[in-house]
């Protein structure tokens, strides 16, 4: 059916976007180039140069908070000598 075909095509496009654009981990310029040059089955990002890629996502910021929390918990244990006792 038509809706099933659209869902399959959408899944294919998203897989290519993930592989070719979202997984580009070099730097901002390479990520921009990956998105700007992306072409798959007639799909492309038009006027991508107008996009601002400098904002951090909610998920990224949440991960930073989690890292800081983990470091703080580690420091607390270290101050109490718990970590030194485990090594003995």
Image (spheres, rainbow, N blue to C red):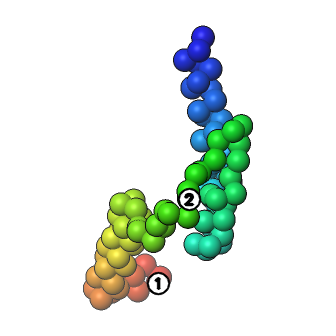
- Rendered location of residue 26, percent (x, y): 65, 72
Q: Residues within 10 Å of mark 1 (few under 14, many from 20)?
A: few
Q: Can you tell which of label 2 and label 1 is closer to the viewer?
A: 2
Instruction: Please indicate, yes or no, whether residue 77 appears anywhere in the rendered image.
Output: no
- Spatial CA span between label 2 and label 1: 57 Å
The residue depicted at 50 percent of the width and 63 percent of the height is 50
Q: Is residue 77 above or below residue 48?
A: below
- Rendered location of residue 51, percent (x, y): 49, 62
Which residue position is annotated with label 1? 88
Relative placement, left or right, of 18 versus 54 is right
Q: Is residue 86 above or below residue 15?
A: below
Q: Is residue 66 above or below residue 14?
A: below
Pick whichever, 82 or 24, lies toward us. 24
Disc 1 is placed on an element classified as loop
Q: Quadrant of residue 63?
A: bottom left
The residue depicted at 63 percent of the width and 47 percent of the height is 44
Q: Quadrant of residue 56?
A: bottom left
The residue most toward the top is 1
The residue depicted at 71 percent of the width and 42 percent of the height is 40
Q: Is residue 75 above or below residue 5?
A: below
- Rendered location of residue 36, percent (x, y): 64, 59
Instruction: Please indicate, yes or no, whether residue 55 appears anywhere in the rendered image.
Output: yes
């Amino acid at each position: 059916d038509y809706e099933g075909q659209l869902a399959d095509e959408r899944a294919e496009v998203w897989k290519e976007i993930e592989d070719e654009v979202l997984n580009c981990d070099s730097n901002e310029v390479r990520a921009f180039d990956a998105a700007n040059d992306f072409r798959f089955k007639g799909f492309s990002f038009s006027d991508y140069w107008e996009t601002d890629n400098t904002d951090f996502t909610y998920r990224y910021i949440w991960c930073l908070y989690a890292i800081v929390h983990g470091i703080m918990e580690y420091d607390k244990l270290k101050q109490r000598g718990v970590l030194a006792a485990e090594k003995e």
